[in-house]
Amino acid sequence: MTTTSARLLEHPPREEIRLEQVLHALADPMRLHVVRHLAALASGEEATCSEIDLAVTKSTSTHHFRVLREAGVIWQIYRGTAKMNRLRREDLDELFPSLLATVLDADAAQRCRLSDGP
Amino acid sequence: MTTTSARLLEHPPREEIRLEQVLHALADPMRLHVVRHLAALASGEEATCSEIDLAVTKSTSTHHFRVLREAGVIWQIYRGTAKMNRLRREDLDELFPSLLATVLDADAAQRCRLSDGP
DNA sequence: GTCAAACTACGACGTTCGTCGTACGATTAG
DNA sequence: CTAATCGTACGACGAACGTCGTAGTTTGAC
């Protein structure tokens, strides 16, 4: 079956997204890794939880995805046995213009700096 | 005496400032309040700890200022019995261009949104 | 039906966080 | 000197965090 399935996940509506929570969600290397991965996808593309390789157990991974979802950073839906993830780019850009891009740039700059340097 | 006094405070050098720590430092309402206050000062101006009114005890206030300093967000020096605070604007802008401004804008937008709304 | 894959729920664990209060140190004003 | 001001150090506390492991549930394939 080409299921357009079922189980629901709670997402904060746009107007309930809070800057502090977003910053907190982004202030963790694991979660920043996820966001970086999702940001690299073409607009509208999705990734499963498991294809984003975090070096932790699945329970921990689930936990981090939930933090991102509850902060309003990502959107998650079930698709068969998999759970698909997308950035909530438009909501974030509307609320906090260029915040996401700036943080991702900062992250890229830092990674570059740390790997180039000694 | 017009003392140019004494006690030293540890600050991370620019190249040791980490994005995750900066985001974590900014992901707290109290600390965001401090940063907002300092950002409103003219460049080079300073504020004491006590003139930035946090609704917490002095120990807690000290704690938050230290988190900001150790993350590399602010610069602190003793001046007599007072401790002066400045944003490390140049260091942050050099490492993470426009991050600070974007976060402050996001904060302003959110405050505006939340006070206008119901 | 059975089985495997993908993710969750729940409880545990040690750590960090935000807060407080009390006691203390440094500096300046008299 | 004394006193007042400003901030610190330390210990406490409950809450939240990041991690794990085990025992599930839901789905799709056979």
Image: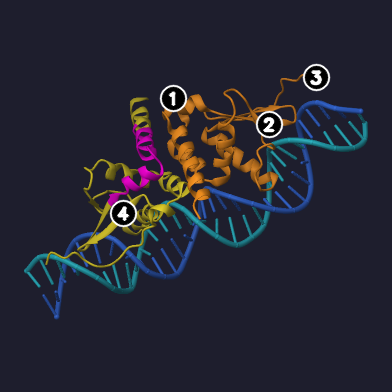
Chain colours: A yellow, B orange, C blue, D cyan
Q: Earlier in the sequence, mark 2 or mark 1?
A: 2
Q: Amino acid at mark 4?
A: Trp
User: Which of the marked residues, 3 or 1, is nearer the chain's N terminus?
Assistant: 3
Q: On what subunit does the disc labeled 3 rest?
A: B
Q: Chain of mark 2?
A: B
Residue pointed to by mark 3? B1
Of the residues tagged 4 and 1, which is closer to the observer?
A: 4
The quadrant in which residue B19 appears is top left
Q: Residue C27's x, y, as percent?
A: 77, 27
Nearer to me, B94 or C6:
B94
Q: Quadrant of residue A80?
A: bottom left
Tell me, yes or no, whether the two marked residues, 3 and 1, touch with CB atoms within 8 Å: no
Secondary structure of the residue carrying tag 2 is: strand
Rendered location of residue B18, percent (x, y): 45, 35
Q: Is residue A4 above or below residue A69?
A: below
Residue B14 against residue A45 in the figure, above or below: above
For label 2, the residue is: B83
- Protein chain holding label 1: B
Which residue does the image show at 31% across and 41% down from the upper left? A36
Helix, strand or loop status at disc 1: helix
Residue that label 1 marks? B94
Is residue A8 magenta-colored?
Answer: no
Q: Which residues are magenta?
A: A86-108
Instruction: Determine the main secondary structure of the stretch shown in magenta.
Output: helix
How far apart marks 2 and 3 lie (CA) works out to 17 Å
**Relative side of A93 to B100, left or right:** left
Tell me, yes or no, whether dots 2 and 1 are on the same chain: yes
Q: Which residue occupies the foreground of this view, A110 or B107? A: B107
Residue ID for mark 4: A75
Q: Are marks 2 and 3 in contact (CB under 8 Å)?
A: no
